[in-house]
Amino acid sequence: MSREIIEFVQELERDKGIESDTLIEALEDALLAAYKKTPGASRHAVVELDREEGDFRVFSIELPPDIEERLLEEARERVLTELEQAEEETGERSHVLVQDEDLEIDWSDVPEEQVKRADVTPENFGRIAAQTAKQVITQRIREAERQMMYEEYIDRVSEVVTGIVQQAGDRNNVLVDLGKVEALLPRSEQVDGERYEQGSRIKAVITEVRSGTKGPQVIVSRRDPELIKTLFELEVPEIADGLVEIRGVAREPGYRSKIAVESHAQGVDPVGACVGPRGSRVRMVVSELRGEKIDIIPWNPEPARFVAKALSPARVREVYLDDDGKEATVVTPDDQLALAIGKEGMNARLAARLTGWKIDIQSDSEFAQAEAEAAFGGGGEDEEFTGRCAAILSNGKRCPNAALPGSRYCGVPAHQELAQREIESPDVEPVVTEPEPELEALADELPPDAEAVGPAVPEPGDEPLESEAPADVAATQGPPATAVADAEGEVDLDVSHPQVAPPEEVPAGIPVESASHDGDDQASASVAEPEDGSSAA
């Protein structure tokens, strides 16, 4: 029988990957515990296996009294230390009586010549060994299988798996059968509004694997952004082949998501590849996410253009960047402000997460008013307006001409009259002047960083009423509505205008190309028109 145990141990090592040395040590420990329960058992003993014959032998251990007392003292200290650590972890004091007979001493460091060994193997020890070996081997096989299962799933973290719902409830955790193990879908990882019926198939992301006494516990999620990324990898061959890369994902589970895609192959449209013929590919992803809307954004290495495109489907006119604070001020047409902010700030919040920039969204009229307030605030001119004519055109923009030496105005007759009136009446309130057509056209062609507002004086006989100023620079009642979203997803609505950051690169009229799908049978693409009114294909 003992020889059969050795052969079975070797077979387990080949088939289950359980090391024979580990299994034999477990057998020896179990047999020693069984021996100590027999009447007349030695106080100190050891069980050894003869690997040639396959027989288990029990040897009693006798030590010199002084060495035995020293080893017992070390064993007592070891037990006390373990009890103190347990009390610190649990916060509860325990009273345990430990006798010397229960202590296990370690005599491995004692010289062999000082240790007396004697064979005390019981006559019926073969039967005890067979029964114990069966129990130990069965237990070790289960532990090995659990460990192998744990190692298999720990390597699959962030992988999307398909399972069958075994148990579900409106407010309870959901158990999902993955085949080999049951996964747990906690309430915190479920999507609001989704119902999981027993027997239905779902896809989820493995987020965590825990080791337990009954096997590995696999935690899955339906809210993780990795779910969208993996679903697109399954549906879009260009992504699986590396021709198209998903650079970022921002998600409001159950409502809307934005993904940024980039092409690594010439002639491959990343947005079109993800949308698919007649929207077939993105429709499959939306169906798996149960109607969640998806915006597909082309990634751009230029932050200003990327921020503008991330606010799709809204059209953006200008983007001002502050690299130091990683903040972006976005100017949109008046009729696009609400669309850029989105419902409860969702569109701005997702764009901030996707780009990693804090985004301040303002309309054209709000931005012009902020410029006017900054120019008429008495704080002096900005460096970018130094040497420029101080006249304000009817479109709310600063005259592009250079001021004459010793004057704040250019040589245009109408502006020279303003200069003369300013000399005669220096305290007169400035108003907007009617520009010559050539100057107005020239001002429209200037880059955004040359746009500004400045003081001017009225013509004789004109009534200096603020109501005569154009709508985009006229004073409004109360602070204008804006939205500020940061990369953490926080959106601040209805705030007053912040200071516009000094522009470094201000791309005006940036075309925004993107695609979105809302769960219907049609996928739509939005293209922002440039500022000059021309359309971008």
Image (cartoon, grey):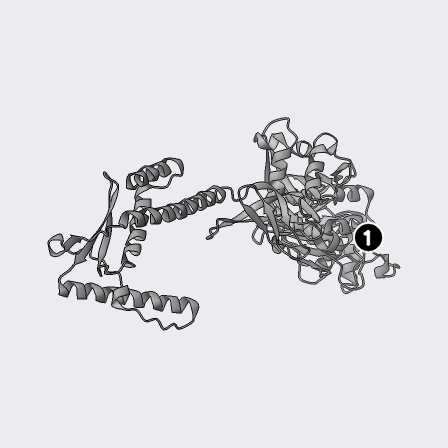
Between 57 and 358, the one nearer to me in the picture? 57
Left or right of 481 in this view: 329: left
Q: State the quadrant of the N terminus.
A: top left
Q: How many marks?
A: 1
Residue located at (78% from left, 64% from top): 478
Residue 287 position in % (x across, y down): 71, 40
Q: Nearer the viewer, residue 529 or 236?
A: 236
> What residue type is disc 1 on?
Thr
Q: Quadrant of residue 238?
A: top right
- Residue 368 in the image, given as x and y percentages of width and height: 75, 53
Q: Position of residue 505 (x, y in %)?
A: 63, 44
Q: Which residue is mark 1?
A: 433
Residue 324 seen anywhere in this rendered image of the structure? yes
The answer to whether 276 is drawn above or below residue 429 in the figure is above
At a point 51% along the width and 42% down the height, the residue shown is 156
| Mark 1 secondary-structure assignment | loop
Can residue 300 be seen by looking at this rendering? no
Quadrant that contains the C terminus? top right
Question: Is 361 placed left or right of 188 in the picture?
Answer: right
Disc 1 residue crowd, few under 14, some 14–19, many 20+, Cα 10 Å: many
Image quadrant assignment for residue 445: top right
- Residue extending furthest left? 113
Q: Of all residues shown, which one is farthest toward the top?
A: 267
Q: Is residue 162 left or right of residue 524?
A: left
Which of 126 and 217 lies nearest the eye of the viewer?
Answer: 126
**Location of residue 509 in the rendering, given as x and y in whole percent from the top left corner:** 72, 41
Comparing 299 with 533, the one in front is: 299
